[in-house]
Image: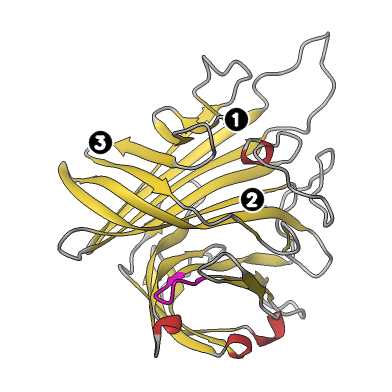
Amino acid sequence: MLVQGADGFAQAKPGQPLSFPIDHGAHPDYRIEWWYLTANLHDQAGQRYGVQWTLFRVAVKPPGKPENGVTSQNNQVYMAHSAITTPDDHRSFQRYARGDEAVDISRAGVTAEPFFAWLDDWILRSTSDDWLPLQVKARQADYAFNLHLQSTTPLILQGDAGFSAKHADGGGSYYYSQPYLKASGELTVAGQKIQVSGDAWLDREWSSQFLQRNQAGWDWFSLHLNSGEKLMLFQVRQQPGKKDGNFLQGKLMKADGNSTDLNPDFIELVPLQKTRVAGRNLPLHWRVSLPQIDRVFEITTLVQDQWMDVDFPYWEGAITVSGDGPGNTGVGYMELTGYPPEKTE
């Protein structure tokens, strides 16, 4: 889905300023975008939980002129993923719907002002006249979450003023984050209600050609450090046998909202151990070295099997950051894509 051709769609390019609140909404001239929220939570006893809520918009075909004076209202497909991780389990769910220009009758869509993203009763929305605070909720059978999200720290433009390159040829996506969200609310796990609180992270991206055909997938990390800092890291992996190296990017975000872009030459992501999950050997244990900011730490998982068993499957889950000092400890989320199934001997 992320390596298809992009002819006829708008292209993400550096130098295009982002504008709010309009860019909180949908961008139908681009082929794909997503609203992606993760939360690292704990209950009153200190037990840890994780929550993911993601809404994808995918254009079926490039935008075009109206045919016979009528504009198609069904050119957009929305796909939603949600997941709940407990100390010993992980449940993932998905839904689909067509978008429609008639907001009052559509099963899925996004409006910028007031901000409202939804697919059926899975919603992420503003609860005031401003973008923040937000509410996120989803329910599937006897699993559900309903969280309120607040922050007083400005959002972060990732990459170069909001343009995030994904390969050496210069292509990429528009990308911004709100990593400073404080979350509180309720989980329902197997019918049991649990009061929780913690840290949440919202990512927004839109593009028309995310990966190149010589790229296999990515390893992505969003970290809440105990120093109050936030850290975003990713590497886009080359296909096996390709000469060029992986494409890396990172940003350290201070507690006050100031940030430092990391030199990719000094980002070292080393998998220490692979674990077999869903027929794949996945790197679930990492050592991260960032000499530019004097950080060295390890990443392990809250639960090893946090596999998103959906139509386009991937590993997405809550992680632990461990090392010396508050800048090297914390929690977060990791996403691993593009790892194919492997045959057993």
Tell me the kind of residue under disc 2: Glu
Pointer 1 or 2: first along the chain: 1
Compared to residue 252, the image places residue 209 above or below, namely above
Label 3: few (<14), some (14–19) or many (≥20) C-alpha neighbours in 10 Å: few
| Dots 1, 3 in contact, CB < 8 A | no
Q: Is residue 124 left or right of residue 190?
A: right
Q: Nearer the viewer, mark 1 or mark 2?
A: 1
Q: Nearer the viewer, mark 1 or mark 3?
A: 1
Spatial CA distance of label 2 from label 3 is 30 Å
Q: Amino acid at mark 3?
A: Ala
* Residue 229 sits inside the magenta stretch: yes
Residue hosting label 3: 141
Magenta includes 343? no
Quarter of the picture containing the C terminus is bottom left
Q: Is residue 25 visible?
A: yes
Instruction: Specify the segment rendered in magenta.
Output: 224-230
